[in-house]
């Protein structure tokens, strides 16, 4: 949306009452994780054609994608869908 708005046109309609600004950084990171997960099998088969990649090993490698993306682009507390209770006062 930002790319279109900044480089092409603005939204001509009205947003619904429930519209919230998307978290673009989180969406980008989520896309990177999905792309990583989807490419594991092809890369493994291309680089190691003599090795059999089991479903369990594929899943294990795919589970590494989120950490890999975070290592590459960093983490941000705002990216989490879960509530972070570390800042609340424990005496409440």
Image (cartoon, grey):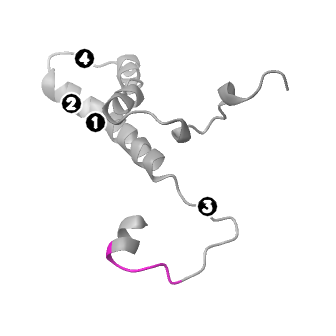
Residue shown at 51% from the left, 52% from the top:
23
34 w.r.t. 24: above or below = above
Query: Which of pointers 3 and 2 lies earlier in the amino acid sequence?
Result: 3
Label 4 secondary element: loop
Q: Which residue is mark 4?
A: 52
Which image quarter: residue 51? top left
Camera-nearest residue between 56 and 11: 11
Q: Residues within 10 Å of mark 1 (few under 14, many from 20)?
A: few
Q: Position of residue 5 (x, y in %)?
A: 40, 73
Query: Which of pointers 1 and 3 lies earlier in the amino acid sequence?
Result: 3
60 w.r.t. 65: above or below = above
- Disc number placed over residue 20 in the picture, else none: 3
Query: Which of pointers 4 and 1 lies earlier in the amino acid sequence?
Result: 1
Q: Are marks 2 and 1 in contact (CB under 8 Å)?
A: yes
Label 1 secondary element: helix
Residue shown at 35% from the left, 22% from the top:
61
- Furthest residue to the right? 92
Residue shown at 36% from the left, 17% from the top:
57
Q: Is residue 48 left or right of residue 12?
A: left
Label 3 secondary element: loop
Q: Are marks 4 and 2 in contact (CB under 8 Å)?
A: no
Q: CA distance from mark 2 to mark 1?
A: 6 Å
Label 2 secondary element: helix
Camera-nearest residue between 52 and 62: 62
- Disc number placed over residue 43 in the picture, else none: 2
**From which residue to which does the magenta span run?**
7-12
Q: Nearer the viewer, mark 1 or mark 3?
A: 3
Q: Are marks 4 and 3 in contact (CB under 8 Å)?
A: no
Q: Which residue is mark 1?
A: 39
Q: CA distance from mark 3 to mark 2?
A: 37 Å
């Amino acid at each position: 949306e930002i790319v279109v708005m900044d480089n092409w046109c603005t939204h001509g309609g009205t947003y619904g009452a429930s519209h919230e600004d998307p978290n673009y950084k989180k969406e980008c990171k989520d896309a990177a994780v999905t792309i990583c997960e989807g490419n594991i099998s092809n890369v493994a088969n291309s680089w190691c054609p003599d090795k059999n990649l089991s479903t369990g090993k594929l899943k294990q490698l795919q589970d590494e994608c989120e950490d890999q993306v975070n290592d590459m682009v960093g983490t941000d507390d705002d990216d989490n869908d879960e509530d972070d209770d570390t800042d609340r006062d424990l005496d409440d």
